[in-house]
Amino acid sequence: MANPHIRAFTRLFNETARYRHRYEVFRDFVMMAGIAIQNAFLKSDELEQEYLGIVRRYEKEDAARMSHLLAEVVMGLEVYPCDFLGSVFMELELGSDRMGQFFTPFEVSKMMAMMVHGDTIDTLSDKPFITLQEPACGAGGMVIAFAQTMYEKGLNPQKQLWASCVDVDPVAAMMAYVQLSLLHIPAEVVIGNSLSMQFTRVMRTPAHYLGLWDSKLRRQWSKDESDAAQVVEDAPTAVPQPMVVIEKGQMSLFDMTA
């Protein structure tokens, strides 16, 4: 399905801050969007200063265009849940400056979600929710594809799915955070290395907070101590820590045998 907002985004993006490198503008847009979403719940002065530090680098007209770019992302995801930001990243040919970084086309992600977990999803109707691990999430395309597959099978991923997503690239992780937030998918997105277990930033989507997922996950995991994951008390004033990185028995998009 052709998404007219992808073309509208790329056209507007090419008119934005022509005095700066294209990747830098895209990075700053994604970071500003993610920070704005986070701070709607965290009310953090540190995040506010980070946002202002980015926006000060742009002229007033270009700062306004940034908000219009976010509007295109919102409307694009309303047309059809997809990896919108990954698509525009590839459309703008920004990957060549990032050591050949490539975001899987959403149609391929959707096919993989159906092939790997289609039958598994059919058995989930009698469970309150499932948890999903994506240790190399990119822009979140595979998680979005999995959520869309759930929806097409009559399940509600906004209430029956919680995802833990990790990526070593801060820009890719923030792309995932923005898209999962706008699609109201309960999730945490962690910037860090799933292999070395070193993490620098943890972000939780609005759906995580609004759905009281700290309590839901704590209750669910306490039922079986052998499958319990590390759960930390989450408060807006606290420094977030990853709730889940690798949980025994957890469905994983990375493990094709899951």
Image (tube, grey):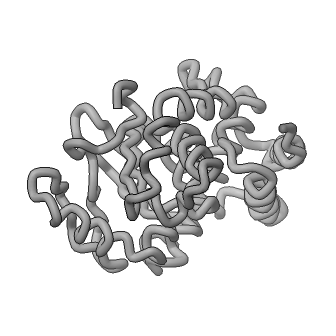
* Res 234 seen here: yes
Residue 192 picture location, percent across and down = 34, 42
* Residue drawn at x 62%, y 59% as measured from the top left: 183
Q: Is residue 222 left or right of residue 53?
A: left
Residue in front for this viewpoint, 92 or 61: 92
Residue 3 picture location, percent across and down = 85, 43
Q: Is residue 166 left or right of residue 210?
A: left
User: Where is 253 relative to 108, above or below?
Assistant: below
* Res 53 seen here: no
* Extreme residue toward the left, this view: 226
Residue in front for this viewpoint, 143 or 75: 143
The image quadrant of residue 166 is top left
The image quadrant of residue 204 is bottom left
The image quadrant of residue 197 is top left
Residue 30 picture location, percent across and down = 62, 52
Q: Quadrant of the N terminus?
A: top right
* Residue drawn at x 40%, y 40% as measured from the top left: 134
Residue in front for this viewpoint, 110 or 36: 110
Q: Is residue 40 left or right of residue 240?
A: right
Residue in front for this viewpoint, 37 or 125: 125
* Residue drawn at x 81%, y 53% as measured from the top left: 79
Q: Is residue 106 left or right of residue 231?
A: right
* Residue drawn at x 16%, y 64% as measured from the top left: 223
User: Where is 40 relative to 93, above or below?
Assistant: below
**Tag count in the figure?**
0
Q: Quadrant of the C terminus?
A: top left
